[in-house]
Amino acid sequence: MLISEFFIMVNQPTLLSSQLFYENRVVEVTLNRVMLGFWKEIETRRKRSASFNCISKDADHHFLLVSEIVGARETEEEDQTNKDGGRKHKVLLYPYAFTVSYTERTKHHCWRCKDIIFHCLDEAQRQQWVQTINNQLSLLSIRPKRLLVYINPYSGKQRGKWIYEQRVAPLFSRASISTDVIVTESANHARDHLKTEVDLKQCDGVVCVGGDGMFSEVVHGLVSRTQSDSRVDQNQPNQDLVPCALRIGIIPAGSTDCICYSTTGTNDPVTSALHIIMGDSQPMDVCSVHHNNTFLRYSVSLLGYGFYGDVLTDSERKRWMGPSRYDFSGLKTFLTHQYYEGTVAFLPAEDNLGNPRDKIKCRTGCHICEQGANNAHLLSGDHVHKMAEENSDKETSGDGVWRVIRGKFLAINAASMSCACPRSPRGLSPYAHLADGTTDLILVRKASRLDFLRHLIRHTNKDDQFDMSFVEVHRVRRFRFVPKHSSVISEVDLSETSGKKICNQVCTAHPNDDTGHSNWNCDGEILPHADIQVSVHCQLIRLFARGVERGTTFDTYTCSVIEGSSLSWQA
Ligand SMILES: CCCCCCCCCCCCC/C=C/[C@@H](O)[C@H](COP(=O)(O)O)NC(C)=O
Ligand SMILES: Nc1ncnc2c1ncn2[C@@H]1O[C@H](COP(=O)(O)OP(=O)(O)O)[C@@H](O)[C@H]1O
Ligand SMILES: [Ca+2]
């Protein structure tokens, strides 16, 4: 935080100010629109270590940002007991306690909910404090008040229900969030419920408790519902889709939890719950996958043919093994060492969106994602049409030149985000972006087992998995794959159709010839077709997350600024 921002913060008009008892001393506590702060020790002067992480470490002044407060509540009698004789005396003078819960950043992007207890002189003062703090929180319009929660009881190690009830629900209740909880009874229960039954106006967000498959169900439900409510046809591969109004929260309880890990930096249920409570918002790209102009599925993380498709196909038969099914099937697939022949055609992304090896990581407030949203706006149907009308003699389509690559591949992966997860902390494409409107297309050509093993191991350490002669990677907006013996891309036709250039692949089908095909792993679901067309839809959905924050915590850079200054708080 800049010192000027700190000045603005402390100079806000005061909403409430009292002398309250806190730990071993009486302090002046003040609330304004942006912070709850106290310093000016009235009685004891005792240096203490850091109390809250978003607060100065100096005993004289502490503050909590209102935006990081979870809620305030009156505290029960038993919470006030303490063994410190001197303190007990003070507690008797200030017997009415209330607790303010707030978020604290700990290691490795994990957040925790911490409590701070103040004591008041009388009941009226306590009620006034609790109400004023909670009223301020209710004015934060980005925070959800009503959530629809879907729990997959069979995700991961089958602990979704326990995780939600024990670790998440108590936090939602502290934040005065009301919930409608549905424990799913079968696959696609959540998807179909969202698609047809729910009154979306009755909630401020949807939460899924489970793995990437469960998140994918919620995405399908929400995106399809939004398109059908707006009469948009999902079967058109080049159709601009309507963004979803509701944000989605993920409470990780699955096997891979790649989407949660890549959007928060960790797979911790409490951290996710706190991001939901704070009302964070992280836009995300969604790929639509089509086969012969028929909509198949959406994908937000990995579309993998060859290695990852085969791992998934094999692991589905071993669901009983839980998350370790992926290790078992991974080893088996690696030993099989199958390669697949086919043709990939892709539309490269614009140069201003960087490239998959530029070492620019997608972090909170990412500029590449911002640029991606600008580009997407310029390329959107409406805008292109308007430009076409205004400049009918100029190049108006955003479509560039398609590239075509034929070959034998061990794997073809499209990573729309880094796909970082506990198994691969940097991810399949460490510099891919969450919301730039592109996907990183990774082509792993036929290579020796040893080379492929070296490539795979690099997903788990710091080495560059793309720095190998048989691997190439491209940042793309759209792509198509056609397996050999099924159909061939015989022509890339860049003709103008309704004001927009499209890539029209002319294919010749070879029916009933399935030999030598893998399956696509589409965010953990097996796709029935090998020949697919993929388009990235920039920022189609939003998550209750803020992306991975940069290394340092708020604490380390605020405290030094505040401690080194001689600021006083204008009450
Ligand atoms: C020999 C060493 C090999 C190590 C390779 C490690 C690479 C791990 C990269 C994992 C990439 C994850 C991308 C996310 C995929 C999920 O959508 C999907 C489904 O996850 P879910 O079961 O729903 O949690 N999981 C998998 C493994 O396909
Ligand atoms: N009640 C249920 N019974 C069986 N399958 C379900 C249920 N609810 C959701 N599913 C399906 O379970 C699959 C795996 O869920 P997911 O939450 O991703 O767990 P995991 O990470 O362990 O794979 C998803 O495809 C989802 O559609
Ligand atoms: Ca992306």
Image (cartoon, grey):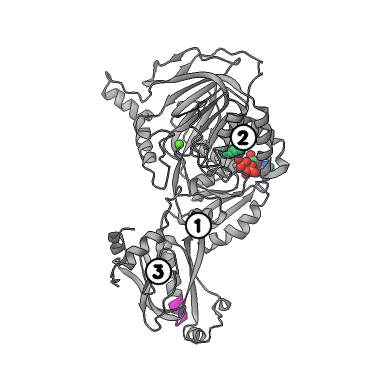
Q: Which amino acid does label 3 sit on?
A: Lys
Q: In which quarter of the image is residue 520?
A: top right
Picture quarter with ligand 3: top left
Instruction: Residue at 55%, 33% (x, y): give it.
Output: 455
Q: Reply above or below: 369 against 43.
A: above
Q: In the visual, does 399 lie left or right of 286? A: left
Q: Nearer the viewer, residue 272 or 473?
A: 473
Marks 2 and 1, the one that precedes in the sequence: 1
Quarter of the picture containing the N terminus is bottom left
Residue at label 1?
A: 107
Q: What residue type is labelled 2?
A: Glu
* Separation of marks 2 and 1 at Cα, in angstroms: 33 Å
Residue 186 image position (x, y, % from top left): 68, 42
Q: In the visual, does 404 lie left or right of 43? A: right
- The reply to whether residue 358 is in sight is yes
Q: Residue 378 lies in magenta, yes or no?
A: no
Q: Is mark 3 on a helix, strand or loop?
A: loop
Instruction: Residue at 61%, 23% (x, y): give it.
Output: 339
Crowding at dot 3, Cα within 10 Å, few <14 / some 14-19 / many 20+, comes out as many
Give the label, 2 or 3, closer to the camera.
Answer: 3
Residue 446 image position (x, y, % from top left): 57, 23
Q: Which amino acid does label 1 sit on?
A: Lys
Instruction: Residue at 35%, 23% (x, y): give it.
Output: 397
Tell me whether circle 2 and circle 1 mark residues in contact (CB < 8 Å): no
Residue 546 image position (x, y, % from top left): 44, 49
Q: Residue 556 shows which numbered tag?
A: none
Q: Residue 525 shows which numbered tag?
A: 2
Look at the image and give the residue range highlighted in magenta: 121-126
Q: Quadrant of residue 4?
A: bottom left
Q: What element carries label 1?
A: helix
Q: Residue 57 shows which numbered tag?
A: 3
Give the label, 2 or 1, closer to the camera.
Answer: 1
